[in-house]
Amino acid sequence: MVANWTDQIPAAFPIVRIGEKIRALFFKATPATLAPAYAPGVGVPLAGQPVTIYSANWCPDCRHLEHYLDAAGATYTKVDIEQTSGAPEQIIRWSGGRRVVPTVKVGDAALLFNPGPHVLERLLGLNVA
């Protein structure tokens, strides 16, 4: 599915898989941009990139992530997949065939599928007291 991806963003590599699920896609990845997601305190966070969260009101993981980002003072745009035409299909294309929420798009740098708050904290350079 990823090989047939037809989004406007150039080739999406590397791809991070856990089991059969795609967990993240990074675009134009370099060690410096990948490091914050996987090694705390290393690399350059993707701070400043626009963040869009594709979520659903019935999803507890979505609510938890949104609450975390609100507490961190992070700015993001929320797309309710139940109310936005085409959003579920977009997520399915991005994720390789699954309807995964929350899906987080970080500018033109990354797509994250059901990321934990700690991943976004490191990747976006957030500081939650």
Image (tube, rainbow, N blue to C red):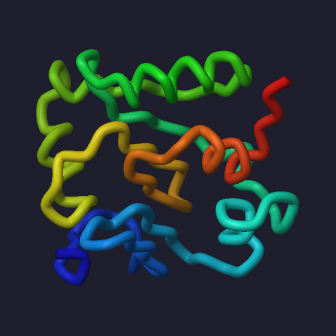
Instruction: Give the image location of residue 10, x and y in percent.
Output: 41, 75
Q: Quadrant of the C terminus?
A: top right
Instruction: Give the image location of residue 92, x and y in percent.
Output: 17, 53
Q: State the image quarter where residue 83 is shown.
A: top left
In the displayed image of the protein, which residue is found farthest to the front?
19
Could you tell me how many numbered marks the image carries? 0
Q: Does residue 28 sit above or below 126 in this rendering?
A: below
On the picture, is 107 further left or further right than 102? right
On the picture, is 110 further left or further right than 101? right
On the picture, is 5 further left or further right than 125? left
Please tell me which residue is depicted at 46% across the width and 36% down the height of the picture: 52
Instruction: Give the image location of residue 18, x and y in percent.
Output: 38, 70
Q: State the image quarter where residue 34 is shown.
A: bottom right
Please tell me which residue is depicted at 77% across the width and 74% down the height of the picture: 32
Please tell me which residue is depicted at 44% across the width and 56% down the height of the picture: 111
Q: Quadrant of the N terminus?
A: bottom left
Q: Nearer the viewer, residue 51 or 65?
A: 65
Q: Does residue 98 sit above or below 8 in this rendering?
A: above
Please tell me which residue is depicted at 60% across the width and 76% down the height of the picture: 29
Q: Does residue 62 sit above or below 12 in this rendering?
A: above
